[in-house]
Amino acid sequence: MRVYCRECGDRGRITKTNRLSPDYTELYCQCNDAECGHTWVGGFGYRHTLNPSAKTTTQMAFQLVKALPPGAQKDLLRELEGAR
Ligand SMILES: [Zn+2]
């Protein structure tokens, strides 16, 4: 990940990270230009999902199937086997 100094435009480097939550991390940054010397804190965070995790969708499918009445579970199994 690249960071840039807002004061001089030079590239900076991340010297330390502080994970505040599963969705947000603070980034301690330092300008690469020794004559500038700017240090700052930026952030990196989760915004939204584009494609759900396969782990999540499989778990959701199992929970949905478990919630079905027994008759509907059998119908679903029959349909799935017919689709093969
Ligand atoms: Zn700078």
Image (spheres, rainbow, N blue to C red):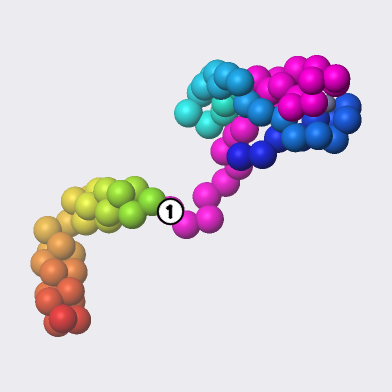
Identify the residue shown where x is 12% and y is 58%.
Answer: 70
Query: Can residue 19 be spotted in the picture?
Result: yes
Q: Is residue 38 above or below residue 58?
A: above
Q: What percent of the width, then of the height, locates residue 65?
A: 21, 56
Q: Residue at x 19, y 51 (%)?
A: 66
- Magenta-drawn stretch contains 49: yes
**Ligand 1 quadrant in view:** top right
Q: Which residue is mark 1?
A: 52
Span highlighted in magenta in the image:
28-52
Would you say 74 lies left or right of 68 here? left
Q: Amino acid at mark 1?
A: Pro
Task: Please provide percent x and percent y for residue 74.
Answer: 11, 67
Q: Quadrant of the C terminus?
A: bottom left
In the image, residue 16 lies in the stretch drawn in magenta: no
Q: Quadrant of residue 16?
A: top right
Tally of numbered discs = 1
Res. 38 visible in picture: no
Q: Quadrant of residue 8?
A: top right
Choose between 57 and 37: the one closer to the eye: 37
Q: Answer with left or right where residue 84 lies relative to residue 48.
A: left
The x and y percentages for residue 30 are: 71, 22
Q: Quadrant of residue 58?
A: bottom left
